[in-house]
Image: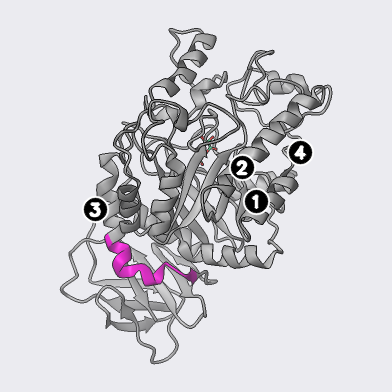
């Protein structure tokens, strides 16, 4: 255990100023799936490299920190003019005003596609418990509020359809914890923190109801909305404490508390049903390691080194997962260079933002997304469908290779705010004698020479002094 923690600390240093107290880190262990259909899907998913995660729910109305102010934990701030109970009531009552009249999923999918994104993960239900699909297990859902009579009221259906139409893989984010469910936060007791608010060992009947509720809802998401490729399960703290250890889970603290007990939502049953409904689906039970975590998901971090097992980092374009009014927004250059680094290290980048409560993408995502879309349109060959290569990095140059190993790619990042220099140099990955190096953006070979164990490229004159996030070479 100790070794794992040390490794995690070394590999997954927080990357940004925005790093939250509560970021999830990648698991230290990984089990390669055995089901051939899952392996096939995993391989296809590894080709995609760049996806979008959309957080949309009641929290979008006030641009708050998705669901979290509901939790009685000190690290999450909320309106203190209300008592906690008043606050919860106010929060749930937002369901009476969620009315996204400008909802236009085709436009969302187009914007995402033009940015070069190849898959979607959408919050069918976040921790707040408000279902963005037409569940039969609860009335707390988008199809039951002011939007109920809109032809697109069952928003999950239309979002999945629109993204599928753009050729993207579809991922259903689903929060296992459900703070609105009486089976998770039982009104009989106080809700002290994010965990189930009763001893699940002492009340097995109540807990069984929660497990069935979760199973049924996941069944609806995977059974009623067409083809789904990824079941992205969030909230790794649905755990069943051991007798005598419950008080710890109740301690009010400025740090989040994850009970160190095994998960108890009956994942084998959920996964079996998931694969009956969606053969080959990737099950990503994040942070709960083992056979139901088909790829790993370090959150708001990039591993320090290349990893051979499949992984995806989720990062936000603004500050926060859901809709936020807050600047700063990451630049196009930052996203491009981050994607390059992530891919060279063997991962996928899942970039997140949130639509407004009216149902529109925020304006501020346009510029950076257009920039990355334009870059990928030209340079995508060095990114999509590639695999890792052993010597994957030298300074600001990152390396990938084609799946068949016949072609290598070098992607040299140009520091934001600077211009393309007359020569570029990288160490290692020297093309074998006589091999040509092509600059992908021009389609033309460049003049290069070997200096010791380095490659020195002469940049075409017309490009020197201009700006780009990165130049990609193939050889
Ligand atoms: C964390 C947060 C959650 C967010 C998710 C996205 O698990 O708790 O709010 O949806 O990260 O990766």
Name the residue beneath numbered marker 3: 417
| Cα gap from disc 1 to disc 2, whole angstroms | 8 Å
Disc 3 vs disc 1: Cβ atoms closer than 8 Å? no
- C-alpha separation, residue under disc 4 versus residue under disc 1: 21 Å
Please determine whether, in this image, residue 436 is positioned above or below residue 112: below
Out of 276 and 410, give the one closest to the viewer.
276
Q: What x and y, as percent, mark residue 122?
A: 47, 44
Is tag 3's residue or tag 1's residue first in the polypeptide sequence?
1
According to the image, label 4 marks what residue? Answer: 262
Q: Which residues are magenta?
A: 374-386
Per the image, the residue denoted by label 2 is: 218
Which mark is on residue 357?
Answer: none
Q: CA distance from mark 3 to mark 1?
A: 48 Å
Q: What kind of element bears circle 2?
A: helix
**Residue 229 falls in which quadrant of the image?**
bottom right
Disc 1 residue: CB within 8 Å of ligand 1? no
- Indicate the position of residue 426 as horizontal and vertical percent values: 39, 72
Which residue is label 1 attached to? Answer: 274
């Amino acid at each position: 255990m100790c070794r794992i923690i040390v490794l995690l600390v070394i590999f997954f240093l927080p990357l940004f100023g925005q790093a939250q107290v509560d970021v999830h880190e990648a698991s230290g262990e990984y089990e390669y799936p055995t089901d051939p259909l899952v392996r096939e899907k995993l391989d296809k998913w590894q080709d995609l490299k760049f996806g979008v995660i959309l957080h949309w729910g009641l929290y979008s109305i006030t641009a708050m920190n998705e669901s979290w102010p509901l939790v009685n934990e000190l690290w999450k701030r909320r309106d203190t003019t209300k008592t906690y109970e008043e606050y919860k009531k106010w929060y749930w009552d937002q369901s009476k005003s969620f009315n996204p009249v400008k909802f236009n999923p085709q436009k969302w999918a187009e914007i995402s596609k033009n940015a070069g994104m190849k898959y979607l993960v959408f919050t069918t239900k976040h921790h707040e418990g408000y279902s963005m699909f037409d569940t039969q297990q609860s009335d707390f859902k988008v199809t039951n509020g002011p939007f109920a009579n809109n032809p697109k009221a069952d928003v999950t259906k239309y979002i999945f359809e629109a993204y599928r139409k753009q050729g993207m893989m579809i991922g259903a984010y689903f929060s296992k914890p459900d703070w609105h469910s009486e089976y998770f936060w039982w009104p009989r007791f106080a809700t002290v923190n994010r965990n189930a608010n009763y001893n699940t060992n002492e009340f097995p009947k109540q807990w069984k109801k929660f497990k069935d509720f979760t199973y049924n809802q996941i069944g609806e998401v995977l059974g009623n909305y067409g083809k789904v490729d990824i079941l992205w399960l969030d909230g790794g703290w649905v755990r069943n404490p051991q007798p005598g250890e419950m008080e710890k889970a109740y301690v009010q603290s400025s740090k989040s508390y994850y009970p160190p007990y095994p998960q108890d939502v009956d994942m084998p049953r959920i996964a079996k049903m998931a694969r009956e409904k969606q053969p080959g689906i990737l099950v990503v039970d994040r942070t709960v390691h083992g056979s139901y975590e088909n790829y790993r998901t370090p959150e708001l971090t990039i591993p320090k080194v290349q990893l051979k097992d499949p992984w995806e980092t989720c990062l936000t374009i603004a500050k926060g997962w859901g809709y936020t009014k807050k600047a700063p927004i990451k630049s196009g250059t930052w996203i491009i260079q981050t994607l390059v680094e992530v891919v060279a290290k063997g991962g996928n980048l899942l970039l997140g933002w949130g639509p407004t409560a009216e149902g529109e993408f925020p304006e501020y995502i346009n510029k950076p997304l257009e920039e990355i879309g334009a870059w990928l349109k030209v340079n995508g060959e060095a990114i999509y469908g590639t695999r890792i290569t052993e010597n994957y990095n030298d300074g600001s140059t990152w390396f990938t290779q084609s799946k068949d190993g016949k072609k290598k790619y070098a992607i040299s990042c140009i520091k934001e705010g600077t211009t393309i220099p007359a020569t570029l140099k990288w160490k290692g990955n020297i093309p074998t004698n006589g091999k040509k190096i092509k600059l992908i953006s021009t389609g033309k070979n460049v003049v290069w020479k070997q200096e010791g164990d380095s490659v020195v490229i002469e940049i075409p004159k017309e490009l020197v002094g201009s700006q780009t996030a990165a130049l990609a070479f193939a050889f």
